[in-house]
Amino acid sequence: MLYKLWCASPNGREKGGVPMARVPFVDKDECISCGICKTNCPQVFRFDSHRKAECYNPAGASEEEIQSQAIDLCPVSCIVWVEE
């Protein structure tokens, strides 16, 4: 199951006033709480109360940074892009 949480901008999906075409989602059922995404992109990812990663601010970093510093490095590939 995919989970999302929006915040950071009025509609939660804008970076610099430009709507994002896609947003990162974390499959919490697959997350192993390694913390790579949270460490590398703390402005986008954090742990929830169950120590599972969540995307709390999809506009907190560029798509390139999210891809290279979180999605590509996730050892269980539980972070994916979802088209809006």
Image: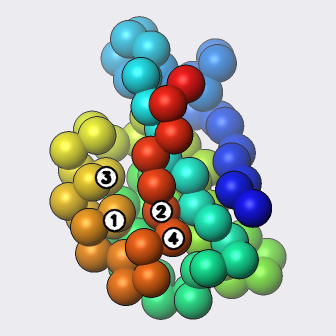
Q: Which residue is mark 2?
A: 79
Q: Residue at x 70, y 45 (%)?
A: 5
Give the residue type that dot 1 points to. Ala
Q: In this picture, is 74 found above or below 54?
A: below
Q: CA distance from mark 3 to mark 1?
A: 5 Å
Which comes sooner in the sequence, label 1 or label 4? 1
Q: Which residue is mark 3?
A: 66
Q: Residue at x 33, y 65 (%)?
A: 70
Lateral position of residue 22 relative to residue 3, left or right: left
Q: Nearer the viewer, residue 76 or 32?
A: 76
Disc nearest the viewer among 1 and 4: 4
Which comes sooner in the sequence, label 3 or label 2? 3
Q: Quadrant of the C terminus?
A: top right
Farthest residue, direction right: 49
Give the residue type that dot 3 points to. Ile
Image position, residue 73 (x, y; %): 28, 75
Which comes sooner in the sequence, label 1 or label 2? 1
Marks 3 & 1, CB-CB < 8 Å contact: yes
In what element is the residue under mark 2? strand
Disc nearest the viewer among 1 and 2: 2
Give the residue type that dot 2 points to. Ile
Q: Residues within 10 Å of mark 3 (few under 14, many from 20)?
A: many
In the rendering, which numbered label is found on residue 78?
Answer: 4
Marks 1 & 2, CB-CB < 8 Å contact: yes
Image position, residue 16 (x, y; %): 35, 17
Q: Residue at x 34, y 63 (%)?
A: 71
Q: Residues within 10 Å of mark 1 (few under 14, many from 20)?
A: many
Which comes sooner in the sequence, label 4 or label 3? 3
Marks 2 & 4, CB-CB < 8 Å contact: yes
